[in-house]
C-alpha cells in the first residue's frame, strides 16, 4: 500500500483514502491508550544536609514503561509521523540513537505492528540492545557516533521506510505549550512547595529537545526560573553556545551515553538557555554513583551529569547566601549500565578515575564544602 495518492483525472474529486485513514485512526487510538494507561512520573525530593537553604527536586523519568525520558519523545515522534502522513500501515521505522530512544521507539513500533531498525554505535549498552530486540526491533551497528545519521537515512531509503530523526524533530514533535509535557508536569508538581518557582532547572542535552521544551515553557508561562544546560567532554553543544557557531563538530563521540553530540543537533535551541556548564566525564560518572548512594537506587550516567550541574548551581547560590529550589531530571536507571559505568574494571580499562570526584562530591552534599578539582563554573 502506498501513502502517495494515485494520479487522477483533473475533473473528479479523489475518493476518500479509507484504508490509510482507518489505520491512522486505530494507531492514534493505540498511542493515546498508552498515554492514558501511564501515570505521571514522580518528582522526588531527596534531602542533602550540606545544601542549606536549597531544596532539590528530581523528576524521575526512569519509571516510564520503557525506562527513560525517551518514552515521551518516542510517543510524540511516532504521533508526529502519523499525523504528517509520513508513517502508514507498512512503514519501516528507522532511528539513529544512543539507545534509549530506540528502546522506546521499538516499544511503540511493536504496539503499532511496524518493523523497526535502530542505528547505534557498537559500544551501546548491552542491556539496551537486548531491550530493543525483545520488542522485535533490529539493531544496526556503526563504528563512530558521527556515522549514525547517514546510515539511518540509507536504511530508510532502502526499506522505503521513515527515518524518525529524533535529533531534528525532538523539539517540534513535542507540544511545548503543555499537553502534559515534561515542563508542565514539573511546574504543576512544584505548586505546593516552599519555593514553588524553581530558581534553576538543570538539564543535559542529547537531542536538546528536553531543554528546548523547558526553556520555551518557562518563557511561555512568564516564570522567573532560569535554565542551565550541562554539557560533557567531546560534545559540540557548549562551544556552539559560547560562539554561536552551529557548525562545530567533535568527531570523538561522547563517553556519557545519552548526552553530548558530535555535532550541534538541530533540536538544540541555545536561545532559550540562560547558562551552560561543561563538566568532566569522570565527575559525571562519580556524581551518578554518589546520587545512587543517596537515593538507594542506581541512576544512569547522564543523571550524574544533571546532578553535578545542579550541585554547581547550588554551590554558587550558597556562596551568595541565596535560598530557593532547584530541579533536575533522572533520565534513566543505572540498571542499564551495570557492566559499564557501575563496573570498576570497565572504568579502569577506559582510563577513567572517579575516586577523587566521588570523595569530594560526597563531602559537598554532606557539608556544602566545594573541594572538587574544578570550580563550580565547570571546565571553561
Ligand atoms: C536523550 C537522553 C538525554 C537528553 O535528553 P534530550 O531531550 O535528548 O536532550 C539524557 N539522558 C538520557 C539517558 C537520554 O536518553
Image (spheres, rainbow, N blue to C red):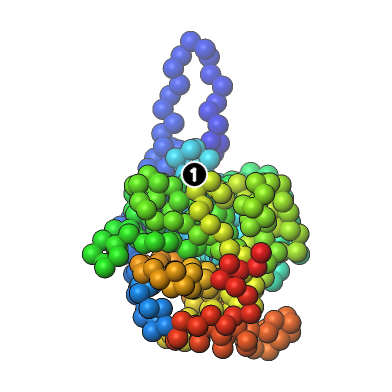
- In the shown orientation, is residue 321 left or right of residue 39? right
Vertically, is 339 above or below 27? below
Would residue 278 be seen by someone viewing this image from the given angle? yes
Identify whether 138 is placed above or below 221.
Answer: below
**Residue at position x 50%, y 48% from top?**
272
Query: Residue 173, position in %: x, y?
Result: 47, 46
Q: Percent position (x, y) of residue 104?
A: 49, 62
Q: Nearer the viewer, residue 306 or 259?
A: 306
In this picture, residue 132 sits left or right of residue 159? left
User: Is residue 329 visible in the rendered structure shown here?
Assistant: no
Quarter of image, res 330: bottom left
Q: Give 57 or 222, whichever is nearer the viewer.
A: 222
Q: Residue furthest top?
A: 11
SS state under label 1: helix
Position of the N terminus by quadrant: top right
Q: Position of residue 78 (x, y in %)?
A: 48, 49
Q: Which is nearer the eye, 43 or 333?
A: 43
Coordinates of residue 38 in the picture (x, y in percent): 33, 63
Question: Which residue in the rendered view is the most extreme toward the front?
Answer: 320
**Which residue is found at the position 44% from the left and 17% from the top?**
13
For the C terminus, which image quadrant? bottom right
Q: Quadrant of residue 238?
A: bottom right
136 over 241 or under it: above or below: below
The residue that appears at 50% across and 59% down in the rendered structure is 228
Determine the residue positioned at 56% across, 59% down.
276
Q: Which residue is mark 1?
A: 172
Q: Is mark 1 within 8 Å of ligand 1?
A: no
The number of callouts visible is: 1
User: Which is nearer the eye, 213 or 194?
Assistant: 194
The quadrant in which residue 253 appears is: bottom right
Amino acid at each position: 500500500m502506498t501513502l502517495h495518492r494515485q494520479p487522477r483525472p483533473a475533473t473528479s474529486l479523489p475518493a476518500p483514502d479509507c484504508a490509510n485513514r482507518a489505520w491512522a485512526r486505530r494507531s492514534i487510538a493505540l498511542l493515546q491508550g498508552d498515554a492514558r494507561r501511564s501515570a505521571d512520573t514522580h518528582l522526588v525530593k531527596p534531602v542533602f544536609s550540606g545544601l542549606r537553604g536549597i531544596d532539590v527536586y528530581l523528576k524521575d523519568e526512569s519509571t516510564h514503561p520503557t525506562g527513560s525520558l525517551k518514552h515521551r519523545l518516542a510517543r510524540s515522534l511516532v504521533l508526529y509521523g502519523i499525523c504528517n502522513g509520513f508513517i502508514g500501515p507498512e512503514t519501516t521505522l528507522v532511528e539513529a540513537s544512543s539507545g534509549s530512544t530506540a528502546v522506546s521507539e521499538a516499544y511503540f513500533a511493536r504496539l503499532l505492528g511496524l518493523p523497526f531498525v535502530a542505528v547505534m554505535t557498537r559500544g551501546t549498552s548491552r542491556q539496551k540492545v537486548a531491550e530493543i530486540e525483545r520488542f522485535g526491533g533490529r539493531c544496526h551497528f556503526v563504528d563512530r557516533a558521527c556515522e549514525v545519521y547517514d546510515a539511518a537515512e540509507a536504511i530508510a531509503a532502502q526499506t522505503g521506510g521513515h527515518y524518525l530523526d529524533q535529533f531534528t524533530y525532538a523539539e517540534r514533535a513535542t507540544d511545548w505549550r503543555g499537553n502534559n509535557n515534561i515542563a508542565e508536569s514539573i511546574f504543576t508538581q512544584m505548586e505546593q512547595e516552599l519555593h514553588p518557582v524553581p530558581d534553576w532547572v538543570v538539564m543535559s542535552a542529547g537531542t536538546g529537545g528536553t531543554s528546548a521544551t523547558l526553556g520555551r515553557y518557562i518563557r511561555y508561562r512568564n516564570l522567573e526560573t532560569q535554565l542551565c544546560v550541562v554539557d560533557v567532554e567531546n560534545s559540540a553543544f557548549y562551544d556552539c553556545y559560547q560562539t554561536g557557531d552551529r557548525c562545530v563538530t567533535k568527531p570523538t563521540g561522547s563517553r556519557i551515553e545519552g548526552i553530548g553530540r558530535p555535532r550541534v543537533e538541530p533540536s538544540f535551541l541555545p536561545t532559550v538557555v540562560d547558562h551552560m556548564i561543561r563538566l568532566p566525564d569522570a565527575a559525571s560518572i562519580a556524581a551518578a554513583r554518589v546520587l545512587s548512594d543517596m537515593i538507594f537506587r542506581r541512576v544512569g550516567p547522564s543523571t550524574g551529569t544533571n546532578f553535578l550541574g545542579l550541585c554547581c548551581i547550588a554551590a554558587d547560590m550558597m556562596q551568595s547566601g541565596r535560598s530557593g529550589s532547584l530541579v533536575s531530571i533522572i533520565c534513566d536507571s543505572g540498571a542499564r549500565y551495570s557492566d559499564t559505568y557501575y563496573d570498576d574494571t570497565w572504568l579502569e580499562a577506559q582510563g577513567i578515575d572517579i575516586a577523587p570526584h566521588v570523595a569530594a562530591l560526597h563531602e559537598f552534599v554532606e557539608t556544602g564544602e566545594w573541594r572538587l578539582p574544578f570550580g563550580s563554573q565547570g571546565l571553561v
